[in-house]
Image (cartoon, rainbow, N blue to C red):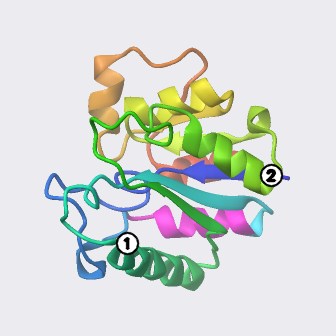
Amino acid sequence: MKLVILDRDGTINYDSDQYIKSPAEWRPIPGSLEAIGRLTQAGYRIVVATNQSGIARGLFDTATLIAIHDTLQRAAAQAGGRVDAFFFCPHAADSTCECRKPKPGMLLEVARRFNASLGDTYVVGDTLRDVQAAAAAGARPVLVLSGRGRKTLEEGMLPPGTAVFQDLAAFAEHLAP
């Protein structure tokens, strides 16, 4: 199975220091929906794996998060794409859970549920915790320079073998020319 795991905020859609708290606040990064479409058409299964501590902070509830993801799914479909599943960590940043990136728990659960090998799976995100989780899970880390990606690159400390792309569209073009 060809599988790509995507972070959400800063990778697919614009991020916000105030959190994305409603479908109305969700805005795709230019080219990201077409990238999902391109990957889908090339036979990749697409999974979103996202930390969502806004739930633990009481900023929004799970039903609202599902509504945001429904908005993303509809927008991706209009671009010929499909997200096969959404995984999220609802815990606060200081949680000791195993699912919050940079820990690999969420990615390992994706692999288990999809019966996929993470060694052949790309994990695409814009933060150090995204690529650290990928490396910890044995997946292929990819940093995009959208969202917080430029700052992440400047700070360094990327896991060995991390590929870097301008944005999700450039990654998709590379993977599915």
- Left or right of 72? Residue 45 is right
Q: Percent from the top left, x then y, of residue 29?
A: 36, 62
In this view, the residue farthest toward the left is 18
Instruction: Tell me the residue at 50%/42% (across/down).
Output: 99
In primary-sequence order, the first of circles 2 and 1 is 2
Give residue 7's position: percent from left, percent from top.
47, 50
Nearest to the observer: residue 160 or residue 134? 134
Tag 2 secondary structure: loop
Q: Is residue 28 above or below residue 23?
A: above
Label 2: few (<14), some or many (≥20) within 10 Å? some
Q: Amino acid at mark 2?
A: Lys
Q: Check disc 1 and report its element: helix, strand or loop.
A: helix
* Closer to us: 166 or 14: 14
Q: Which residues are magenta?
A: 30-40
What residue would you read off at disc 2? 2
Q: Which residue is mark 1?
A: 62
